[in-house]
Image (cartoon, rainbow, N blue to C red):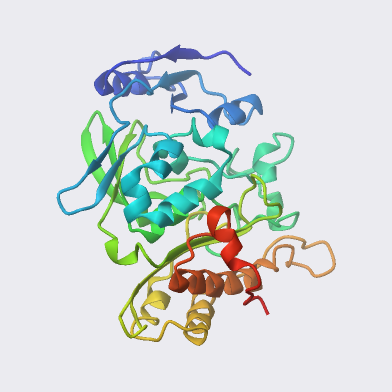
Amino acid sequence: MTPFDYSAPHDADTALAEIAFDPTLGGVAQRRHFIAGGTNLIDLMKAGVATPDALVDVQRLPFADLTETADGGLRLGALMRNADTAEHPLVRQRYPLLRAAILAGASPQIRNVATNGGNLLQRTRCVYFYDTGTPCNKRTPGTGCPAVRGIARQHAIFGASADCVATHPSDMCVALAALDAVVHVRSQSGERSLAFADFHRLPGDRPELDTTLAAGELITAIELPPAAQFADHSSYLKLRERSSYAFALVSVAAALDLTDEGSVRAVRLALGGVAHKPWRNLAAEAQLVGKPAVKASFQALADAVMEGARACGGADAPGAGQDNGFKIPMARRAIVRALEMAAAGITTNTGEDAARLQGESTWA
């Protein structure tokens, strides 16, 4: 690990000033990073992927509270720990989808340290990104993307580009995308808010950029709009290569608002493990409105969502271009399964709800 400067300011103005500080007075600015829990950044530094010149520790800043908004939503402090967020009574009551995603996303030890704002800023777990001995456009722009032709089981089937096929690793972010969250940020220039759909970006020809944050901006809070209509019929389904702590091959956050007759009044659907950002298809979601909440309707929605999915990797091996091709039927079936779970009031395929899924199958 390379040497770096460290500071721990007690107020936001000082933290923002320190992150923007350029000791060269007009030359190339230092690479300065905010750090809170550090559960991802420290790993990147140990691997030599991130080599900051300075860390500005923001854990002492007053952004760790959860408050109710005037319209019945919640404002989650960016420095609130993932564990505290998942177990907060108002999150458990009003946003069980978010709680399920957080609990699926990491070990208890990590959840006790990781912050909400840091969760949004996780870097990809692409093996080539972490291997400093291989080229990677996300790590070093212009060097190439070996995953396009190489091992790509974890990689994107939506929104990829010729320069990058990496996926976003967060589970929490998939739920936040489905809940239409809003991200509040602050800089020396002032404050602004970003719709969650606009916070993360697709790789295009700038895969080194994960988000639309401007330089020197600090996440202060994540706002959840009211979602009482989805509380009883939401689910988070995570499919991974082992049941212990692992990143998703495919995950689905599904939420339904159902009429007394069992038809769909509103639907929210977001996918994880399939793109550079949590993936939504609003046009496909709209097709389910007014339809009965039954398997045939969910299959039609899954077909619409999966249009345009494209496998990658394995170009030099038999079945060229299909290294992650299994994700396409997996995601289609996962969408149907998650919607069936939501309709039945089953929140997750792990933990306390796992037993309720025994003996049920829609994977055929």
Would residue 279 be found to the left or right of residue 330 on screen? left
Residue at horizontal 38 percent and vertical 23 percent from the top: 59
Q: Quadrant of residue 364?
A: bottom right
Q: Position of residue 153 (x, y in %)?
A: 71, 57
Residue at horizontal 29 percent and vertical 66 percent from the top: 229
Would residue 316 be found to the left or right of residue 6 on screen? right
Q: Is residue 321 above or below residue 120?
A: below
Would residue 17 be found to the left or right of residue 106 on screen? left
Instruction: Count all numbered tags in the image, as a single digit.
Output: 0
Q: Is residue 161 visible?
A: no
Front residue of this view, candidates 71 and 183: 71
Front residue of this view, candidates 255 and 193: 255
Q: Position of residue 155 (x, y in %)?
A: 64, 56
Quarter of the rendering occupied by the N terminus = top right
Residue lying furthest right: 318
Q: Is residue 63 above or below residue 3?
A: below
Residue lying furthest left: 70
Would residue 364 be found to the left or right of residue 291 on screen? right
Residue at horizontal 59 percent and vertical 69 percent from the top: 331
Q: Quadrant of residue 285?
A: bottom left
Q: Is residue 357 visible?
A: yes
Residue at horizontal 58 percent and vertical 45 percent from the top: 124
Q: Position of residue 305 (x, y in %)?
A: 49, 74
Q: Position of residue 24 (x, y in %)?
A: 40, 14
Q: Is residue 188 above or below residue 312?
A: above
Front residue of this view, candidates 6 and 171: 171
